[in-house]
Image (tube, helix red, strand yellow):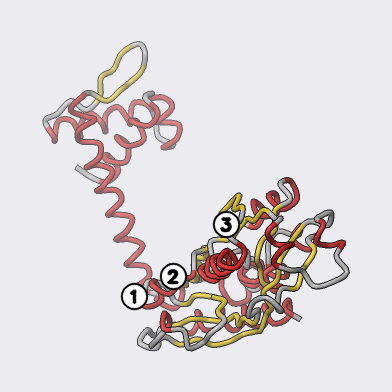
Amino acid sequence: MNFDQLLYAEVLAQHNSMQKAADVLHISKSGLSIAIHQLENELEVTLFDKSSSGTKLTSEGRQLLSSISDILRFKNNLEKTATIVANPQKHQKVSIHYMNTMLKPFISTFIDNYVAKFENVQVNISCHEFESIVRRVRSQEIDAGFIAINNINDESIENLDFTPVCDSKLVLFCAPDNPLNALNRPISLTDLKKQKFSLFNDKFHDEIFERLQFQCGPLSLVLRVDDAWAMNQAIFNLNTVCFGRIVQGNLSSNTDFSKLKIIDIGHIFDDDFKLGWLTNPNYMISEKAQELLRDITAEVKKDAQ
């Protein structure tokens, strides 16, 4: 038994045709048939049933297919790990999580500098809520998280390192035709009671919305979402309003965010936030990861101006 035979069985199971599988594998149909027959003899099990309708797995073959797939998967993982062990500097992985909408500087920085700096780096970037980012940084599952926080002494990030990158104000985003834009005065609680809200999945937005309801009574919540495009659709098509930080609009991958109107709420809530990196002092970040974080920081500062 060899890996080629196992691969042939895997591919044949996908296509249910000797000719199609042979074409995919770039071998002759007869060569594929011989290899499958040899594998069946060694396993003492008939894996495939050949008929006019094709070549399909037998019930025994279906039971063994998952084991065949596991062996091939383990082989690939072994080869990948061996390559990394042999050339650690050429195969690095960086994992970064960010809070809602702020994807643009992460992707643009990586793509713009890929050839010059990060060609041998696999970057995993994904959007998560504040609590998830804190938990994963604390458990050392990720290299760093990019968060927004209005109290750097927040107990939830105790014993973690927070490195500020820029300041931003919390505001209310709304569509250009929302009546709030026609006011020639600061908005009031009465004005907010008339609005429909959509919220990003964000701990601080939830807290503000809850405090607002303490003062106003129950408010209409239409949508919760992580995606900037979905939020933009709700604001323009459902005429909702949402909390957001001014920098979020600048850093969003959705350019339509720039078309939204900004309503100041600093006279109602504490609107001062800091955006920055959350890292674990007990976790050694690689030099490449540090370089990527520095480049992203520069991009964020540029966009935040």
Residue 218's label in the rendered image is 3
Look at the picture and state if 21 lies above or below 169: above
Q: Which residue is drawn at 24% across and 48% down?
A: 71
The secondary structure type at the circle numbered 3 is: loop
The secondary structure type at the circle numbered 1 is: loop
Question: First in sequence: mark 1 or mark 2?
Answer: 2
- 1 and 3 marks in contact (CB < 8 Å): no
User: Taking 163 as reference, is 171 left or right?
Assistant: right
Q: In which quarter of the image is the C terminus?
A: bottom right
Q: Residue 199's spot in the image, x, y percent?
A: 60, 59
Amino acid type at circle 1 is Ser
Q: Residue 121's spot in the image, x, y percent?
A: 50, 71
Amino acid type at circle 3 is Pro
Q: Nearer the viewer, mark 1 or mark 3?
A: 3
Amino acid type at circle 2 is Glu
Q: Mark 1 points at which residue?
A: 139
Q: Nearer the viewer, residue 88 or 66?
A: 66
